[in-house]
Image: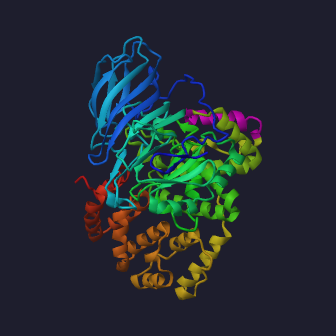
């Protein structure tokens, strides 16, 4: 049942679902070398993280300590951690005695190695530290950047290698840890985390516990003026007061999604599934932090047309959180599986045709993206040596990965493939695995007893070669074909107001906009705008696509809305194509830089890292 906390908001603190599993027994297995981490977990491995932090939202820093429990595999080896832009104040052993430590040179991508000399009996160390302005994971927002405009806000975003900028730890997906936290925040603000929420103690600290081992990038924190609304016994929504009721209505099907996913892929093992709607600066659509998905307000369309994001983040509870990529070169194991599971959930809840529309649109976007990607970045098992892992974050791990799994489903049949998936999740639960381990399991558990079917799938081609194989599934949607017919009518000279767009959902409008001819001029854009009011759209997906077209075709009537959008929305998915389009002309780039100079402080480092390169901001 739900508990009422001191501040009067409802919290899901002790509501534990019947399918929540106890923490699995720790197993020592070799961890693949991670080129994006300084740590040496095959010598000394962190198993548990205990945070004790004070949040200062005015000074924009967190200060306190972290205790790390250790597994000593090599008693002669030091503990090596990842740290980025942290002020380390001291390190002590289990009895409080100081330990020798050294913070190595900083790498621009990876931060610094924090090396701690251990004594033979040490199984725990305590690191006193505080964050600095260089904590790229932490987004501190002024009150005017929130929905309510009254109080400041903080959220963290750890994926891929940013958790090290607010916690010194082994920041690699190959190391899984349990964690606990005591968080103190200013009065009137409520912290929440990707963990079981244990409530607020008499000392004013909010307490959290994650008893299931997770990779470091899933340790997440948010703090602001928050309220909670229950959707079901195990699902609910956190958001600012002015947003929370609308968000609860938008996501009222969440419990149905959880049940559908369980019926397809096995039990949900994390207890609760809640969401928090963050301010618009959040750089992603969603982040699958266990027990508490972080989500952008740009998915609140009012008609549930963008709730595929919830299905996607929920699906990560199996692919990504339960079974994790061991290195960032294996990222497709998280995202390709998740897109496939998301599409199956959407089909179960909203029907086959809705799923077909989303698959066809995704394929169209992937094929467009492939035109601009270098061959090395078109490979599922991407080589990221000497590169930041975010450089591998494209549509390839998501959509090409999902197409590979759909091809397996086509060949082996849905029932057989579903049984394989459930066995796969059970066999690798709470583990981080590589592409090679998946390939070995696939050949052993699916291919071995059906060699004639296995011969129809060129696994090496899918995993290790660029482009899309010729046998990639190509979905067709009757509803999108209906849209194409209206595009053809308008292109042939039919007035926009005469087109039949009755009952269209977001996916159909996106198909319409994507299908418009390249020969548009401002007058034709104005005709469309008068008929369909695109510039005034409250649907962020439709608006972002329209603004991109407006830049490309010189439709200046949308300039004011474009500037407002860029100033207030921090989602990288929308920012990247808009700034890219602006940067194609000298005048557009000047305008982009003028807007960006004002907007940049509002964006998360994940977004600025991308836009800086597009606009040449460093120079």
Instruction: Name the residue: 71% across, 42% down.
Output: 455
Rendered location of residue 536, percent (x, y): 44, 76
Rendered location of residue 560, percent (x, y): 34, 75
Image position of 573 with respect to 420: above or below:
below
Asked if one can make out residue 513 in the rendered structure from this viewpoint, the answer is yes
Quarter of the image that includes the N terminus: top right
Image position of 568 with respect to 433: above or below:
below
Rendered location of residue 314, percent (x, y): 58, 49
Q: Is residue 161 left or right of residue 268?
A: left
Instruction: Name the residue: 42% across, 36% down.
Output: 202
Instruction: Name the residue: 72% across, 47% down.
Output: 263
Query: Image quarter for residue 109?
Result: top left
Highlighted range, magenta = 431-451
Asked if one can make out residue 413 in the rendered structure from this viewpoint, the answer is no
Is 458 within the magenta?
Answer: no
Rendered location of residue 359, percent (x, y): 61, 60
In the orientation shown, which residue stands out farthest toward the top? 120
Q: Is residue 583 left or right of residue 46?
A: left
Quarter of the image that includes the C terminus: bottom left
Query: Image quarter for residue 145?
Result: bottom left
Q: Nearer the viewer, residue 533 or 166?
A: 166
**Total tally of numbered discs in the picture:** 0
| Main secondary-structure element of the magenta-colored stretch | helix
For the rendered model, the colour scheme is rainbow
């Amino acid at each position: 049942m739900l508990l009422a906390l001191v501040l009067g908001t409802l919290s899901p603190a002790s509501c534990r679902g019947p399918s929540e599993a106890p923490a699995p027994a720790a197993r020592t297995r070799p961890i693949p070398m991670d080129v994006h981490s300084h740590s040496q977990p095959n010598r000394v491995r962190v198993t548990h993280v205990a945070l004790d932090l004070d949040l200062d939202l005015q000074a924009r820093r967190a200060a306190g300590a972290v205790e790390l429990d250790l597994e000593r595999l090599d008693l002669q080896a030091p503990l090596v951690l990842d740290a980025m832009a942290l002020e380390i104040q001291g390190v002590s052993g289990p009895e409080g005695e100081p330990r020798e430590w050294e913070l190595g040179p900083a790498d621009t991508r990876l931060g610094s190695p924090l090396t701690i000399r251990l004594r033979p009996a040490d199984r725990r160390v305590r690191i006193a530290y505080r964050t600095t302005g260089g904590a790229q994971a932490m987004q501190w927002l002024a009150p005017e950047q929130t929905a309510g405009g009254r109080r400041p806000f903080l959220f963290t975003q750890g994926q891929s290698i940013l958790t090290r900028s607010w916690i010194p730890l082994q920041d690699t997906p190959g190391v899984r840890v349990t964690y606990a936290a005591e968080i103190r925040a200013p009065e009137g603000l409520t912290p929440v985390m990707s963990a079981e929420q244990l409530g607020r103690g008499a000392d004013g600290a909010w307490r959290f516990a994650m008893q299931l081992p997770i990779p470091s990038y899933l340790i997440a924190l948010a703090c602001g003026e928050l309220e909670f609304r229950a959707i079901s016994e195990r699902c609910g929504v956190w958001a600012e007061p002015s947003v929370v009721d609308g968000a609860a209505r938008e996501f009222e099907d969440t419990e149905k999604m959880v049940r559908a996913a369980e019926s397809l892929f096995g039990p949900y093992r994390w207890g609760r599934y809640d969401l928090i709607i963050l301010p618009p600066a959040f750089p992603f659509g969603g982040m699958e932090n266990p027990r508490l998905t972080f989500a952008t307000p740009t998915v609140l369309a009012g008609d549930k047309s963008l709730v595929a994001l919830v299905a996607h983040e929920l699906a990560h509870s199996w692919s990504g959180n339960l079974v994790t990529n061991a290195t960032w070169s294996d990222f497709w194991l998280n995202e390709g599986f998740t897109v496939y599971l998301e599409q199956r959930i959407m089909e179960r809840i909203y029907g086959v045709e809705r799923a077909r529309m989303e698959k066809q649109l995704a394929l169209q976007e992937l094929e467009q993206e492939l035109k601009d990607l270098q061959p090395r970045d078109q490979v599922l098992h991407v080589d990221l040596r000497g590169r930041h892992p975010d450089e591998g974050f494209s549509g390839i791990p998501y959509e090409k990965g999902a197409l590979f799994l759909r091809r397996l489903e086509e060949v082996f049949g849905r029932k057989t493939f579903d049984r394989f998936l459930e066995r796969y999740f059970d066999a690798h639960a709470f583990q981080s695995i590589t592409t090679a381990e998946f390939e070995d399991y696939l050949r052993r558990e699916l291919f071995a007893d059906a060699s004639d079917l296995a011969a129809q799938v060129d696994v090496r081609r899918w995993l290790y070669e660029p482009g899309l194989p010729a046998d990639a599934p190509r979905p067709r949607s009757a509803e999108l074909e209906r849209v194409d017919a209206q595009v053809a009518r308008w292109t042939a000279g039919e007035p926009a107001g005469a087109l039949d767009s009755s009952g269209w959902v977001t996916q159909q409008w996106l198909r319409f906009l994507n299908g418009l001819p390249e020969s548009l001029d401002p007058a034709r854009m104005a005709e469309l705008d008068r008929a369909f009011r695109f510039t005034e759209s409250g649907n962020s997906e439709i608006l972002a696509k329209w603004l991109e077209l407006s830049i490309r075709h010189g439709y200046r009537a949308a300039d004011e809305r474009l500037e407002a959008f860029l100033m207030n929305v921090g989602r990288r998915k929308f920012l990247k194509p808009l700034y890219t389009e602006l940067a194609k002309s000298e005048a557009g780039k000047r305008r982009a830089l003028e807007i960006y100079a004002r907007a940049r402080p509002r964006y998360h480092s994940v977004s600025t890292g991308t836009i800086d390169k597009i606009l040449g901001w460093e120079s």
